[in-house]
Image (tube, helix red, strand yellow):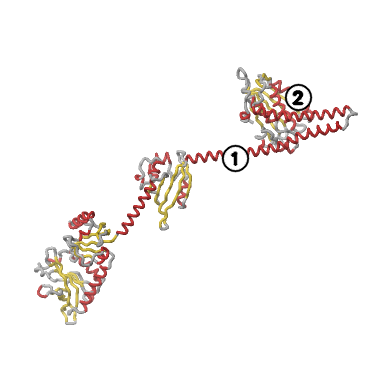
Amino acid sequence: MPAAASPATPGALDSAEPLNRDAVRQALGALSTLVSVGLFAADAEGSCWYVNQPLIDALGLELHSREERPFRLALPGGTIPRDGLAYLEVTAAGFESAAGSGSTRLGARVMPLVAGSGEISGYLGVVVDGDGGESVKTLHTSERLVDALVDRSPEVITILNEDGTWRYSNAAAWRLLGFRADFDPADGILSLIHPDDLHLAEGVLARLRAGVVRPEPLELRVRAAGGTWRYLESLLENLVDDPVVHGFLIRSHDVTERRQSRLALLEANERLSTLISSMHFAVLMEDEERRIVFTNEAFVSLFEVPVSADQLIGKKVTDLGPEFLQHFGDPTWTDAMDRSAEVVQESRPIVGDRITMTDDRVLERDYLPIVAGGEYRGHVWLFRDVSVQARAEAAWELLIARQRRENERLVQLDRVKAGFLAEISHELRTPLTSILSFTELLSDGIGNDDPAEQSEFLEIIRRNADRLLRLVDDLLLLDRLQSGAMPLEWGVVDLPSLLTTCVSAFAPSADLKGISLSCEIGEGPAIAGDPDRLSQVIDVLLSNAIKFTPEKGRVKVNAAPQDGLWHIEVADTGIGIPKNEQESLFERFFRATNARASRIPGSGLGLAVARVIVALHGGSVLLKSAVGSGTTVSITLPLPTGKGGGQTSPGLAGDEAEGADV
């Protein structure tokens, strides 16, 4: 045992090294909570400056301040015996012991505190009884308890001497590294550190010796007995001035598995990043605050972002600048803000949601929420430019719509055809029935004795034959006009004279029904046209007007040139035409429902023929009607504009005629 220090100046140690004493007080106080034994600390002269509470309570003393020192360490011969036993003298006013009053001596096991100079600066002790019996056993039990607690700790505890050499490691170190408990590396503890980490460890120790505090943990690789490397996360503390430790304390945790898991995760993330980066569609991952966590170059290319994908990490889409947003808009927050907000709020996967950007591109996006531990942690957007596909689909939908309309038109035409066949069958059957009936009468000799009756039968046969001929002629005429197979016979047409002639021809028919037929025709220039076909148009309009106007009704024809056009109008007070049927009235074979219901005869060809003839003259037809009020049909024909007047190409085809106003 080292010799006791020479006497110091009285009171000199009272204020010496207060920080060390505070550390000792804390250490002994902590130990007192684990074992119920008397602990004390004394200076080099034996004056106790610390006694723990269990000893004070056991003796029943009352100390009013830390400066009171009723305890003193008595060392036989001024040195510590080989067995470390000494006596602690207790002198306190009013203290009564079993041996008498005034003072008592307690057995103590003492350990010296050695300063850096090698001199004893004080003592630490544990109180035992005078003969070293039960108290020594208690002390040994306490020591074994402390050793067991330290050795069974999962934390690796290592103490290095002030010069960096190894002094102590607990059992956790040997269990972790696989060395024997008495292992003492010949080249020091630093020889177990990985060569790549050695420079870092030496630098940290050097800074600790210099008094630089390092509270941050340090990760080092340490060699195990089998030659493998373990990663230890260590926290180093400089306790050189601590009277108990007097060195460097290293507390370490094994983080090998955590590091391996982290490396495996990083590797998986790297592979995932490589995979995502190579994808042709844009990927955007955002956290719960809509900050970008990951994106790829496809996103940058798709939206023409002026920075790389890595530079977008940590930013928000709205941080990319007004020019970006103004040109493209937020690809995740477009004009359909309510829709995007609903998607994010519902936090359910969305696949194939289409949005239209401000530059008219069409993007298809998928939304996938990220949920970890039952909590929303962000989401992933996938974007694909489907503009070409969208245009193709739109064109296809348009084609389908047109085809659907065409099919509907064909179905309607089929219905019209079926109706026409029924109607034309009726139109053909009626005159044919009359012809056959009166022919049979004549064949049977009826009327042979009465020439007048015979002449009447023949007139009926002739009239019905003419009716059949007109019907066939109308069908052939309409077909030839629409196909361009029948050219117009162009000439100079005096419309006032033509109209007057037509009105006069229908005066007898109007008189038979008591219909008032009038005309008001202004003066105007002649036009170029086919007078026979134009007369046919006026005849169709007058025939319909008189046919569909009840008795005592009115039919009026007005005509006058205006704004470079001849305007001809035929108005009646007839049954009128339902509004939803007026656009179809100029189609072949079409007849209004009220006309069919009234059993008014007709083939549905007259207006179709009239429209084609007017179109071939460069004019147009307009119809206005109201059920029960009558119908007005207006025709416009162009006035002469130069040589050739208002002539149009005689080769006007049916498709062009279909484009004329109705």
Residue 525 quadrant? top right
Q: Which mark is residue 601?
A: none
Which sits in the foreground, 41 or 417?
417
Give the residue at mark 1.
404
Q: Outermost residue toward the right? A: 449
Dot placed on the residue nearer the N-terminal end, 2 or 1: 1
Q: In which quadrant of the rendered image does the N terminus lie?
A: bottom left
In front of the other: 208 or 124? 208
Question: Which residue, given by chain and number where applicable, does mark 2 sit on?
Answer: 505
Left or right: residue 612 compared with residue 137:
right
Residue at image coords 47%, 39%: 360
Q: Does the rendering let one see residue 580?
A: no
What element does badge 2 sit on?
helix
Mark 2 vs 1: CB contact within 8 A: no
Instruction: From the top left corner, tell me how far across and down residue 67 is, in percent.
Output: 17, 69
- Assess disc 2: are there few (<14), some (14-19) or many (≥20) residues with their C-alpha within 10 Å of its C-alpha: few
Question: What's the distance in space between the residues labelled 2 and 1, CA to CA?
Answer: 46 Å
Hey, which quadrant is residue 136 in on the image? Answer: bottom left
